[in-house]
Image (cartoon, rainbow, N blue to C red):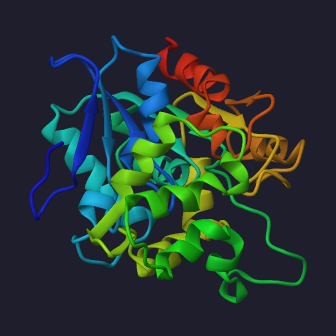
Amino acid sequence: MTGTPQTLAVTSFGPSSDAEAVLAIHGITANGRSWDTVAALLPARRILAPDLRGRARSNALPGPYGLRRHAEDLAAVLDADGGGARAVLGHSMGAFVAVALAARRPDLVARLVLVDGGFPLALPEGASADDLDIAALLGPAAQRLSMEFSDEDAYLDFWRIHPAFARDWSSAVETYARHDLDGSAPHLRSSTVAAAMLQDGGELYGPDWYLDALRGLRMPVTVLRAPRGLLDADPLYAPGALDRFRALVPQLRIVEVLDVNHYTILFAERGAVRVAAEADARP
């Protein structure tokens, strides 16, 4: 783990070398340890997995937040890593950040692998982005930000009963959850800054600048879709919903991943193996 008060904390997986590293970007209330299962399947690949501004070991970095601010932070990480175009992975909100990075600094992005994210979410009928309750949409993942936990086991128990992990608890989920904790017992809390979640979440519904960013992508783009969503029920993207984005991204390739939800596409091996294959693919 590396990081200073002025830079993102970054978990580095794989060999210690100057080999080109994959960049892996986590979701809206997550952290860099979201990528443990994928990284374990790619032991020969160096993977950089930052904690985004306002999360985990980067939660002391101040706002403002937003997709473009995260893109600036990540460009600095890659420049410090020697620059050059490489594969960029993003899960959920991290996929939107990956697109923002590719639009801002295409010299750093050889190809995009977007994991159940990266394309504007559908607004409820009659609603506008300004009307949305981001915390309500995220469910338990957001609710935990206002909770305290007496010890690490209590926090792990919170995640064990989350619908997404009810049949898929693993050491990778446990590592991810422990990395999220901040404070001291008996006053442990999630490290995610609520203001960061709200500001970032408001940009997931396709503002004009983001549509322009999608339209300007020239590198290969693959999106992996989960058939079930954050609560192991309705998916983030309905079947066929991603097809319409080919009008913006003609080179878009869509991969359907079976028997996973929005989380287990990354944490369960049956999902992670598909993500790892795309991360390791050659153009």
In the rendered image, the residue lying farthest to the bottom is 131
Q: Residue visible at 28% across and 20% down?
A: 14
Q: Quadrant of the N terminus?
A: top left
Would residue 124 be found to the left or right of residue 170 on screen?
right
Judge whether 103 appears above or below 150 on screen: above
Q: Name the foreground residue: 183 vs 82.
A: 183
How many numbered marks, from 0 up?
Answer: 0
Residue 190, given in percent of the width and then of the height, sits at 40, 69
Q: Is residue 257 left or right of residue 7?
A: right
Is residue 65 among the parts visible in the rendering? yes
Residue 45 image position (x, y, % from top left): 34, 16
Q: Residue at image x 67%, y 30%?
A: 251
- In the rendered image, residue 108, in percent from the top left (x then y), is placed at 32, 36
Report whether 126 appears left or right of 109: right
The percent coordinates of residue 212 (x first, y second) are 58, 58
**Whether residue 202 can be seen here:** no
